[in-house]
Image (tube, rainbow, N blue to C red):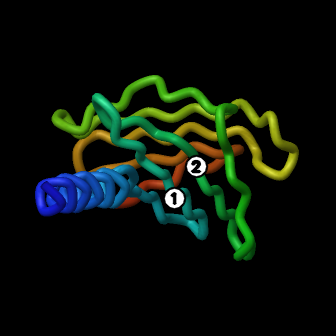
Amino acid sequence: MKNVVRSTALATALLLIAAIVHATSSLWFEGGGYWLDMEIGHTDRPLVASVNFYAPGNSQGVVLRDNFNVARFDTDRKDLVIEYAGDDPRVPPFTLVVHGEKAILRIGNARIESAFDWFM
């Protein structure tokens, strides 16, 4: 009986560790001195949990949570649109549009194109 309990406890612990390991991943945009690191949560389907925004010359970055809009996020079609209205004065309004392997960041008067890798 003790071996059954130990085996069940071990299996449960391994499943919990596997769930935690696969709970988040990231995608990122880099171009024009900007870097957006998106934390991807995995529940029923992937979702953008947060965006770490780095402006040119800013190595500290600003974490955006719940104050951006994910208009589209389809990992199968490789389609992502994130809109940020500028609620935090440290981060100007921006829109990130990704179709396939091409990404465009619109921020201020700039339109920055970059390659995009969907590997999570």
> Circle 1 is placed at which residue position?
37
At 59% from the left edge and 63% from the top edge, which residue is drawn? 34
Q: Residue furthest front?
A: 1
> Circle 2 is placed at which residue position?
51
Name the amino acid, label 2.
Val
Please indicate, yes or no, whether residue 103 appears anywhere in the rendered image: yes
Q: Residue furthest right?
A: 89
For this rendering, which residue is in front, 39 or 71?
Answer: 39
Specify the quadrant that holds the C terminus: bottom left
Name the amino acid, label 1.
Asp
| Residue 63 horizontal/vertical position (percent) | 69, 53
Mark 1–mark 2 Cα distance, whole angstroms, equals 6 Å
Specify the quadrant that holds the N terminus: bottom left
| Residue 27 horizontal/vertical position (percent) | 39, 56
55 vs 77: above or below: below
| Pointer 1 with pointer 2, Cβ within 8 A | yes
Q: Quadrant of residue 106?
A: top right
Classify 10 Å Cα crowding around label 2: few (below 14), some (14-19), many (20 and above): many
65 vs 55: above or below: above
Classify 10 Å Cα crowding around label 1: few (below 14), some (14-19), many (20 and above): some
At 21% from the left edge and 61% from the top edge, which residue is drawn? 6
At 44% from the left edge and 47% from the top edge, which residue is drawn? 104
In the visual, does 37 lie left or right of 5? right
Q: Could you tell me which secondary element the residue under label 1 belongs to?
A: strand
Q: Could you tell me which secondary element the residue under label 2 belongs to?
A: strand
